[in-house]
Amino acid sequence: MNDGLLPVTHQVASAPLETVELNLSPLAITVVEQQRFDTPGVLETMRVVPTMLEPRTMSLPVRPPQLKVRSFVFPMPGQSVLKPPPSTAKPAASATSPNTASPESPTKTAADELRKFTRIKPPGDVIKLEDRLFYVLQPPLETVITGGTLEFPFHPFPYQLEGIAFLYPREAAVLADEMGLGKTMQTISAIRLLLHAGEVQSVLIVCPKPLVTNWQREFHAWAPEVPLTVIEGDAAKRRWQWELADCPVKIANYELLQRDREMIERPDARFDLVVLDESQRIKNRNSTTSEIVRSIQRRRSWAMTGTPVENRAEDLVGIFEFLAPGYLKPEMKPSHMGRLVSDYVIRRTKDKVLTDLPPKMFRDAEIELTPEQRSTYRTAEEEGVLRLTNLGREITIQHVFELVLRLKQICNFDPVTGESAKLERLAADLEEVADSRRKAIVFSQWTETLETLKERLGHFRPLVYHGGI
């Protein structure tokens, strides 16, 4: 060790003296000196002699400076968070004719193929870069609909896709489209995407009583795989329905909230999203209905209305007391109020989206009879069938028509109690029509029905025309 040599000991077999070049250093050549022995397997000593090389040019790699970065993991386009689980059921085929279209069941046209993609835009109040990137990097809604990620019974209109993209990222939003543009479909589609993305697990929809069946029908058409419960029945049944934990969507009417206020305001009753349909019902901040819906514990709040909220500052303040309490004040100037709510309200009228709509739209509204009407209908049907049976060979087609007409009249009004599910739905629709300064035409084949409607809808100042005039 004193002579500067590095001893390396290992076991080798007999071999002739040789020189080996080792890459121990870029500036040295290693010469290995090996002493030969006749006996194989003996220990021998190797000398490592460093020798200086002639001057030469070398290239040394220089690492780039270490930069601090933040990483975000987002799903691939084919693995979007909007993709449903494998067990998702396929929507049932619609019975709507391909020659007809409506905002609730629009058809796909060639113009849809050429329009620009609709992307989810982050709300203005989103500050974190991670949250903004989450929405920006989501695939276009057209990809979700046409790519098989989620199946829709019909391809939505372009403005409806914009409405879905508007609702999806917002914790507080007002969908104020004009009547007939498909607010229900847009809301259901946005809820469906949020449920599949896992961003919400419990949703409460509050609507007028005549619109409950409409919400059921639209959910079955646009989100058939989503379980839902309609809060109805006696007090014991409603309590059980409110406490259901494995049902992501519950539907209740405004009138029922007053009876079940205790159930709604209990500490463990909390929803990820509460949607108010016909939200002009809470425009009066001092009303009982407004107080109840504001007391519901929730993380997201959406409101739907077809009335021109931009023309009624007080109504807008009442709605925002539900969405964001204290955000608007009645004393604010309308121009200032409009700037404040611009990121929370979306409103489209028919004239603005006329190019997206077909020449005519047909929509059938399925309405459930009231309990009184159902009882009277069943009795009349049983008695009518029994009468036809007793006629035997004397029965004629006229007898059958008489029974059908009788049942149709009961579907309009219960002759015993005067109850009418159709009238309730008509009154709810006419309120939105009148507030939007539009007009409606109601047809009936019976003069008596028209006279009854004139009496019960007198506050709308109807004009009646029939053959007797």
Image: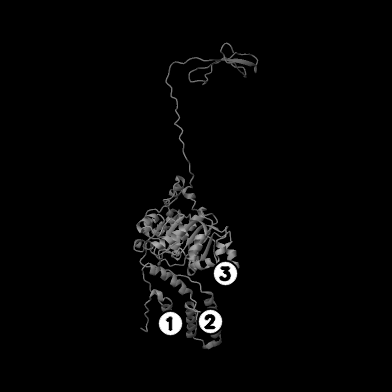
Q: Tell which of 111 and 407 is nearer to you.
A: 407
Residue of label 2: 380
Query: For mark 3, does the 10 Å Cα neighbourhood hold few (<14), some (14 to 19), or many (20 or more) residues?
Result: few
- In the image, residue 375 lies at what x, y percent? 55, 78
Amino acid found under the numbered disc labelled 1: Glu
Distance of label 2 from label 1 (alpha carbons): 20 Å
Per the rendering, the mark at residue 369 is none
Q: Given this view, does label 3 or label 1 mark the residue nearer the observer?
A: 3
- In the image, residue 259 lies at what x, y percent? 55, 67
Amino acid found under the numbered disc labelled 2: Ala
Of callouts 2 and 1, the N-terminal one: 2
Q: Given this view, does label 2 or label 3 mark the residue nearer the observer?
A: 3
Amino acid found under the numbered disc labelled 3: Gly
Where is the N terminus found, in terms of image quarters? top right
**Furthest residue in direction bottom, as rendered:** 394
Question: Do callouts 2 and 3 mark residues in contact (Cβ within 8 Å)?
Answer: no
- In the image, residue 118 lies at what x, y percent? 40, 54
Query: For mark 2, does the 10 Å Cα neighbourhood hold few (<14), some (14 to 19), or many (20 or more) residues?
Result: some
Identified at 50% across, 57% down, the residue is 273
Of callouts 2 and 3, the N-terminal one: 3
| Above or below, comparing residue 260 to residue 387 in the picture | above
- In the image, residue 454 lies at what x, y percent? 41, 78
| Above or below, comparing residue 380 to residue 147 in the picture | below
Q: Secondary structure at mark 2?
A: helix
Residue of label 3: 233
| Above or below, comparing residue 426 to residue 69 in the picture | below
